[in-house]
Amino acid sequence: MYRLAEERISKLARAGLASRLRTGKRGIEKESLRIRRDGSIAQTPHPVSWGSALTHPYVTTDYSEALTEFITPAFDRTEDVMRFMHEVHQFTYEMLSDDELLWASSMPCALKDDRTLPIAEYGSSNIGRMKHVYRVGLDYRYGRRMQAIAGVHFNYSLPLDFWPGYRDVIGSDLPLRKFIDDHYFGLIRNFRRIGWIVPLLFGNSPIVCSSFLGGRTTRFKQFDHCSHFLPYATSLRMSDIGYKNKNQAALDIAYDDLDNYVRSLSRAIATPYPEYEVIGLYDGDKRIQLNTNILQLENEFYSYMRPKRTTRPGERPSAALRERGVEYVEMRALDVYSFGPTGVAEEHLRFLEAFLIFCLIADSPQISAAEQWGIEYNELTVAMRGREPGLVLIKGSERVPLQAWAEDICAGLEPICTILDDGSDTPHYMNALHQQRALLGDLEQLPSARILRDLREQRMTFFDYTLKLAYEHEAHFRGNPLRSGLRDYFKGLAEESLAEQRALESSDKVDFTTYLAQQAMPAIAEAGAD
């Protein structure tokens, strides 16, 4: 894996194509719970001053009215991603009620019960109602606690002018679109193999409010009167109490290639599931699921990495992929970074960019059933025990020390970081790599260990500590207001999005039941496609 990656990097450099790697597109989607000043989850609607959660391009909601999602455009430079993320936070804080702020962790604040997390509303249009009913269905299927977890998604693509030259370097005679799709799926397979390094290095959710566990505390240790933890955990968000959903463990989604991926995902969307059939479609006259199938929509599949294609109005993600191929990948394994005001660290993004390029150019055979078992073991083990001294992971037929394997991966990133830094006055990528390699030498300096150390030294509960960070982040943004021109820009976007929502609500031509049936037809067709 590592030798082939190094050979391909050398070939790209000799062919004069290495510079193409520096012009990839990257963007961020980051979620944050909106809270009251006492730390409880906000019960107010998504602020109208922010715009429409249905149609705003950069400020929306995820599962809940209180779970805000900030989105950046795709940029050529990481510093532009960070700048935009900072600006959109400045705007939202300027428009936010003085009674509210944003929680500073992936794991949610105190949850009295599921009802304290209001499900997101998107208006009366068919698409808006569909988004709401989908979330109601998630509540019936999984409960709301899991849906309150926040995360960061890193979107990445290579520039289009990289691919023809890379195909020549590989010596492939595949049609270009097929070549691109196959190599993005190779990236995804390799991320599944070694992506455990992301929660190891960047996870910072080793502890939760006891209320989140809902009494399921057997495996956990009590940290204080209102917090439970695992002493060597890196990311409980990525464990089986969070993002790793047990209900979907039996899903057999194929990553061999695009056609098999779309077919297997569409099959799950079109296949009835007895447990969800018992729930039914209605509670009285209220629609509570889009359907009773294994998945209501593609997004219900909780994968750590997704192939993506920008969709057209009314188009399903799987149909867009089949029709036009993979445009970019969405990496979903990052916790909210509690120590930074935006919840994202620039040096982390630079490391991840080099890491995804490495996953792309390294050898990526198909994943066997035996390897799949090892992948799942490694993911869960690192999330729950990643800093345990002497920890070993499964690599093929061997068991290898976690730190040695992580160091091998980092060594494979060196030539990529050298290329990405070429022409820059400051070696940002190599600095980011060196920072992470230093942490591998002392796992107790990782962010997940820092959280627990701070709590002990400051004698604070997880709740009080995270609320303190939230107040610090709020002070940062309220003390650094937007320039007037940018404020006007974001206000204009908010007004445009509200007008767009009103237009959608007045333009529906069919009733909601008919609309849902029309939306289901492409998935049924894909599931039966040859």
Image (spheres, rainbow, N blue to C red):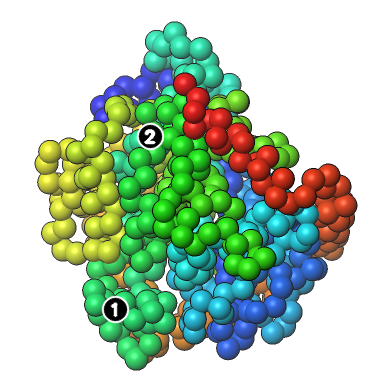
Q: Residues within 10 Å of mark 1 (few under 14, many from 20)?
A: some
Query: Furthest residue to the top?
Result: 173
| Label 1: element kind | loop
The quarter of the rendered structure image containing the N terminus is top left
Q: In this view, does 182 lie to the left or right of 101?
A: left
Q: Circle 2 is placed at which residue position?
A: 254
| Label 2: element kind | loop
The relative height of residue 211 versus residue 337 in the rendered view (above or below) is below
The kind of residue on which mark 1 rests is: Thr
- Percent of width and height locating residue 438: 30, 56
Residue 69 in view (yes/no): no
The kind of residue on which mark 2 rests is: Ala
Name the residue located 26 percent from the left edge and 45 percent from the top edge: 375
The relative height of residue 456 versus residue 73 in the rendered view (above or below) is below
**Residue 236 is drawn in which quadrant?**
bottom left
Instruction: From the viewer's side, name the closer residue of 32 and 513.
Output: 513
Disc 1/disc 2 C-alpha distance (Å): 34 Å
- Percent of width and height locating residue 112: 49, 84
Residue 90: mark in rendering: none
Q: Circle 1 is placed at which residue position?
A: 217
**Residue 88 is drawn in which quadrant?**
bottom right
Instruction: From the viewer's side, name the closer residue of 501 and 342.
Output: 501
- Percent of width and height locating residue 94: 75, 72
- Percent of width and height locating residue 348: 45, 53
Q: Is residue 362 left or right of residue 176?
A: left
Residue 160 in view (yes/no): yes
